[in-house]
């Protein structure tokens, strides 16, 4: 089992920045990747960014050039720096861990609201 604790989020004006952080504990030796998803009202949960153990990163097209994921494998943490935020970035953001053999773990979610 992997437990995830998120921090960050909040309300920001368009063009502003926020930073989300997530710390994993428990069976962290089994982690394959860490990342962030988001879910806006009435929409499906979508991948925002992820980082695998070989440091390969993946971003949603909508956030490329604005968001940066960083992962500290030694500390089992992952952060998401979000710059140039837009109202359409408003969503609940979830920390995600994929682990061996094929398990998915989710944080409790943190609200990000971008006002226009």
Image (tube, helix red, strand yellow):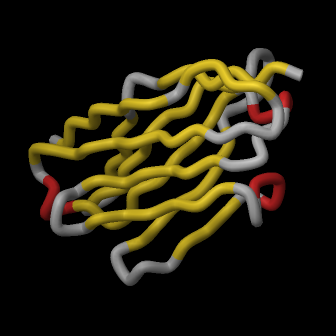
Q: Which residue is drawn at 55% across and 72% down?
A: 57
The mark tally for this picture is 0
Vertical arrangement, residue 41 with respect to residue 53, above or below: above
**Residue 82 x %, y %:** 63, 47
Q: Which residue is drawn at 69% across and 49% down?
A: 83
Q: Residue at x 17, y 67 (%)?
A: 74
Left/right of residue 111 with respect to residue 100 in the rendered view:
right
Vertical arrangement, residue 58 with respect to residue 91, above or below: below
**Residue 71 x %, y %:** 37, 64
Left/right of residue 90 with respect to residue 52 in the rendered view:
right
Q: Residue at x 66, y 29 (%)?
A: 39
Image quarter where the N terminus lies is top left
Image quarter where the C terminus lies is top right
Please tell me in which quadrant of the rendered image residue 75 appears: bottom left
Vertical arrangement, residue 71 with respect to residue 38, above or below: below
**Residue 47 x %, y %:** 64, 49
Please tell me in which quadrant of the rendered image residue 18 appears: top right
Left/right of residue 50 with respect to residue 113 in the rendered view:
left
Residue reaching furthest to the bottom: 54
**Residue 70 x %, y %:** 44, 63
Q: Which of 30 and 102 is in front in this view?
A: 30
Residue reaching furthest to the right: 116
Please tell me in which quadrant of the rendered image residue 58 appears: bottom right
């Amino acid at each position: 089992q992997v437990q995830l604790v998120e921090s960050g989020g909040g309300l920001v004006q368009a063009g502003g920045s926020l930073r989300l952080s997530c710390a994993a504990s428990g069976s962290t030796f089994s982690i394959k990747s860490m990342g962030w998803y988001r879910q806006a009202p009435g929409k499906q949960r979508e991948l925002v960014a992820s980082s695998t153990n070989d440091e390969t990163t993946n971003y949603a097209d909508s956030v490329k050039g604005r968001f940066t994921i960083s992962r500290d494998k030694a500390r089992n943490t992952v952060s998401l720096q979000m710059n140039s935020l837009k109202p359409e970035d408003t969503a609940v953001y979830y920390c995600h861990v994929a682990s061996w053999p094929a398990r998915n773990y989710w944080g409790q979610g943190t609200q990000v609201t971008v006002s226009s």
